[in-house]
Image: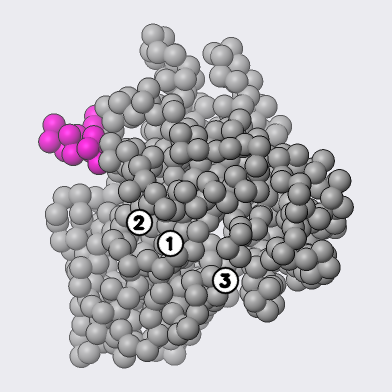
Amino acid sequence: MNDQRTLSARTRQTCLEEMAGKRFDLLIIGGGVTGAGIALDAASRGLSVGLVEKQDFAAGTSSRSTKLVHGGLRYLKQGDVQLVREVGRERAILYRNAPHIVIPEKMILPIVEKGTYGKLATSIGLYIYDVLAGVERKERRIMLNKKQTMEAEPLLLTDILKGGGLYFEYRTDDARLTIEVMKTARSHGALCVNYTEATEFLYENGKVTGIRAKDLLTGTEYAMHAKKIVNAAGPWVDQLREKDKSLYGKRLHLTKGVHLVVPYNRLPLKQSVYFDVSDGRMLFAIPRNNSTYIGTTDTNYQGVLERPTVTREDMEYVLRAANEMFPTVKLTEQDVSSSWAGLRPLIHEDGKSPSELSRKDEIFYSKSGLITIAGGKLTGFRKMAERIVDVVAKQLAEEEGRSFKPCQTDKIVLAGGNFASASMIPAYVKKQAERLGAAGIGEEQIRVLVGKFGSNSEKIVTKCLEYMEQDQTQTAAEALLLAELHYALDEEMVMTASDFLIRRTGRLFFERDSLEAVYPRVMDELAKELHWDAERKDREWKAFAEEYHLAKTFL
């Protein structure tokens, strides 16, 4: 195995072979943010850790959320004070440990006639929210009258507007956050692989001792063994519980959330807005670089787990809601540049609608020893991981007399987060931009790059300069793309074009209009570096073409 402990596509095969040859303290099934968080927590406490994910890392729920590390204002309305307190504190920890991908954003909550929150409720609610979440003084809520609200956001409808609350939420890139956690887990010794499916459990005397794992890229099967196995498969947890014959009692209730992306100039908001919809729900509209995205819905889901889609009804609902709140923009289907749908793996409660279901996580214990974690929110992933690893460490301590360190992930800086504070990032962007200034790469491009890769952008800029020196016929933009791709191959286990163009860089959703010029080059480079034959390359072309098509197709 490579000594560098990087999450490299080039050592994935070696990693699988190593995983098959050892018995882990802990084996995790699921490579979303929860599984990644568990891997980091356990590895940093001294456990030997393996993780398998049957798709790409973060390909399920963890790349399809509203992309907010938020304090859960709506949970306050449901009376869930503890959840608000916990996720508020978690937000501050994430901001400290990953300042490149956890960004404070002003959020306006318009107060409208017959809306979800009245003026007094908003004022008190936001105040309690600030206190519970431990919000810094400079980010505490400000109440606005109607005139001030209209000045803060001129696109808001005016006839039923009564005022607004201005507060802070934190925007993130959920897939990038997951991959940074996974890379950090790897740096602490965890062995993590994507495109590897746990096809069945292995047992001895009725106790689960391992899994049969299939490499979906080569078809090779491996037996992997562990003292403890955690099922953190998100929407798939019940399928695994069924394989374990332990699907009884509580089970999942899947709901679907969709988001639409429009060009920023079609919805040029001054800040994010959390607004009422006439049916009683609330949606977010969030500016991000040259786009604004709007969502999310909350409907029951029973379709294919791997590929939830945005229906025409979903699309029309979101556009109608946006046009009601921002009546002058008159968004149409033609304005939608891309979309995504994701599933929330909630815990079922009889008689409750999707929006009323708790976002709390729960741990299930099987007679075989399988431990399952389900539910929860992106913001709470670190605490979910801590709870699970506490359980595993306690069991191992009782069975083997070993002792483990307590959780320390609140102090672990994530990959890419090596900045003394978030305030240092603009100077870092400027410095990297200066290195490429002569080549015509602007500061804005570097700002976007640093927003994805953080302090690791320096490696990408260095590679870019090397490529430009080696081949002076290519443009700086081509060299930068190539450098980004090679970094993702070497340190982020990119195995397909979709891994790179969707989850590592967000291009499919937020830079879709640039893809036609980019993805043939990406495909050629991947084919060369990963040694694809013509048949494999053709398969990859078709797979990405389908993703590209689906992002703008409403069935």
The type of residue carrying mark 3 is Lys
Marks 3 and 1: CB-CB under 8 Å?
no
Residue 140 or 54: which is nearer the viewer?
140
Image position of 180 with respect to 457: above or below:
below
Type of secondary structure dominating the magenta stretch: helix
Residue 448 in percent (x, y) is at 57, 33
Q: Residues under labels 3 and 2: Cα distance?
A: 28 Å
Q: Seen from this angle, which residue lies furthest front?
A: 159
Near mark 1 (Cα within 10 A), the count class, few <14, some 14-19 or many ≥20, is: many
The numbered mark at residue 308 is: 2
Image position of 189 with respect to 522: above or below:
below
Disc with the residue nearer the chain's start (2 vs 1): 1
Residue 89 or 321: which is nearer the viewer?
321
Q: Residues under labels 2 and 1: Cα distance?
A: 8 Å
The type of residue carrying mark 1 is Lys
As helix, strand or loop, the secondary structure at mark 2 comes to: loop
Residue visible at 45% across and 48% down?
Answer: 315
| Residue at the spot of label 3 | 383
Residue visible at 39% across and 49% down?
Answer: 312
The type of residue carrying mark 2 is Pro
| Residue at the spot of label 1 | 256
Near mark 3 (Cα within 10 A), the count class, few <14, some 14-19 or many ≥20, is: many
- Residue mark closest to the camera, 3 vs 2: 2
Marks 2 and 1: CB-CB under 8 Å?
yes
Residue 274 in percent (x, y) is at 66, 54
Near mark 2 (Cα within 10 A), the count class, few <14, some 14-19 or many ≥20, is: some
Asked if residue 307 can be seen in this view, the reply is yes
Image position of 411 with respect to 318: above or below:
below
- Residue mark closest to the camera, 3 vs 1: 1
Write the start and end of the magenta stretch as one range: 527-544
